[in-house]
């Protein structure tokens, strides 16, 4: 009985994997965009295209994606460019053979994936904001700042 159930489960899993591998380009793009939980407008901006172009990718109105757009889409969604392009290999870039995440990167990714969509968007906004803030090492020391305020 257990053997039969295991075989049945194997068949179901293989069927699922076959359907998964047979996805069309637009279905893979749609999956990556949806899984990223990023607004389509943000993806379009990052890729340097209009939001309408991203809609066309998802609908299948574009059969071949320019390499630069494919790689940018892979970068922003975290999906493997190879998987997006031809449906082969690991789906996610972080799961590529030979890619080693540091313990901090792995912990951050795990925490991020456990957040709600709103929390992920908030965190992403905070991180983006941090990139535009001047590093502490290039700011005047607190004593220098105090002297500047008193002088003005």
Image: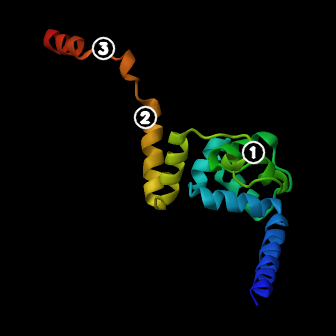
Examine the rendering and report whether any part of residue 92 can be seen. Answer: yes
For the point 81% across and 44% down, the residue is 66
Examine the rendering and report whether any part of residue 56 can be seen. Answer: no
Q: Residue 89, relative to residue 48: is it above or below?
A: below
Report x, y in % for residue 112: 49, 52
Question: Where is mark 2, residue-wise?
Answer: 130
Report x, y in % for residue 115: 46, 58
Task: Answer with left or right where residue 130 lies relative to residue 27.
Answer: left
Instruction: Identify which residue, 2 or 57, lies in the foreground.
Output: 2
Question: Where is mark 1, residue-wise?
Answer: 97
Q: CA distance from mark 2 to mark 1?
A: 31 Å
Task: Answer with left or right where residue 149 lies relative to residue 76.
Answer: left
Residue 59: quadrant of the picture: bottom right
**Mark 2 surroundings: few (<14), some (14-19) or many (≥20) residues within 10 A:** few
Q: CA distance from mark 3 to mark 1?
A: 44 Å
Looking at the rendered structure, the secondary structure element under dot 2 is: helix
Tag in front: 2 or 1? 1
Numbered mark located on residue 140 in the image? 3
Residue situated furthest bottom in the rendering:
1
**Mark 1 surroundings: few (<14), some (14-19) or many (≥20) residues within 10 A:** few
Q: CA distance from mark 2 to mark 3?
A: 18 Å
Image quarter (top left, top right, bottom left or bottom right) of the C terminus: top left
Looking at the rendered structure, the secondary structure element under dot 1 is: loop
Task: Answer with left or right where residue 117 lies relative to residue 134.
Answer: right
Image quarter (top left, top right, bottom left or bottom right) of the N terminus: bottom right
């Amino acid at each position: 009985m257990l053997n039969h159930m295991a075989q049945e489960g194997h068949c179901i899993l293989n069927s699922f994997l076959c359907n998964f591998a047979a996805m069309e380009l637009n279905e893979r793009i749609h999956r990556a965009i949806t899984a990223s939980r990023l607004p389509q407008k943000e993806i379009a901006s990052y890729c340097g295209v209009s939001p309408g172009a991203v809609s066309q990718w998802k609908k299948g109105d574009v059969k071949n994606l320019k390499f630069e757009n494919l790689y940018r889409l892979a970068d922003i969604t975290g999906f493997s460019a190879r998987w997006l392009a031809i449906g082969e290999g690991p789906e996610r870039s972080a799961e590529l053979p030979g890619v080693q995440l540091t313990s901090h990167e792995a912990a951050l990714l795990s925490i991020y994936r456990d957040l709600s969509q709103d929390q992920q968007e908030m965190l992403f906004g905070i991180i983006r904001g941090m990139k535009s803030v001047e590093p502490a090492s290039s700011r005047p020391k607190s004593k220098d700042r105090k002297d500047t305020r008193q002088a003005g």
